[in-house]
Amino acid sequence: MKVRSRNPITGARRVCLASMGVLCVAVGAIGVLLPGLPTTPFLLLATWCFARSFPPLERRLLRNRFFAPYMKFVDGEPLPPRIKAFAIATVWLFVALSSALILINEWAPAWVVAIIIAAAALGTVIILRRGMRRHRDVAPVAAGE
């Protein structure tokens, strides 16, 4: 039997994390309908908040029929090649558009565009590596087994 702490700070922290999770789910839901507003980062943040504050909400979010497709990669499944290609193409399309707008209208210095491009490159590497097996994680099989 798990004994819960009666510390009011712990309770306040749980309430804050759960509230932040609910807010992130709301913003993520708006992102499903509104192009340009990302959905997945907010849902991932909500999942993190719920995991640390109220795990039943985390399980409910991961099983939700509207939000589960956005978090499919959380469970460790490799992304299908078609989804990887679409994700990478979308990332670079919006990076190109935003970089062009920033540079043409001089809204920010060029180093901001460099940071955006570096973040997109990192995201591309992460997407491409998703689902690859790491050989060092696999224990060697002993001879004769």
Image (cartoon, helix red, strand yellow):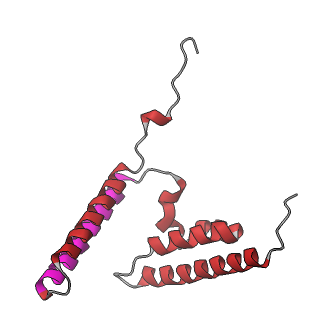
In the image as oriented, which residue stretches furthest toward the top?
144
Viewer-proximal residue, 59 or 83? Answer: 59
Viewer-proximal residue, 83 or 134? Answer: 134
Which residue is located at x 56 percent, y 73 percent? 46
Q: Position of residue 123 (x, y in %)?
A: 33, 61
Viewer-proximal residue, 79 or 110? Answer: 110
In which quadrant will I find the N terminus? bottom right
Is residue 114 depicted above or below 123 in this figure? below
**Residue 98 lies in the magenta stretch:** yes
Is residue 132 depicted above or below 1 in this figure? above
Residue 90 relative to residue 101: left or right = right
Q: Does any portion of residue 58 appear in the rendered image?
A: no
Residue 74 relative to residue 96: left or right = right
Magenta span of residues: 80-104
Which residue is located at x 47 percent, y 85 percent? 30
Q: Position of residue 2 (x, y in %)?
A: 84, 60
Which residue is located at x 33 percent, y 57 percent? 84
Residue 74 relative to residue 52: left or right = left
Dividing the picture into quadrants, the one containing residue 20 is bottom right
**Residue 23 lies in the magenta stretch:** no
Q: Position of residue 75 (x, y in %)?
A: 54, 55
Q: Position of residue 19 (x, y in %)?
A: 63, 82
In the image as oriented, which residue stretches furthest toward the right?
1
Q: Does any portion of residue 144 appear in the rendered image?
A: yes
Dividing the picture into quadrants, the one containing residue 133 is top left
**Most common SS among magenta residues:** helix
In which quadrant will I find the C terminus? top right
Residue 35 relative to residue 40: left or right = left
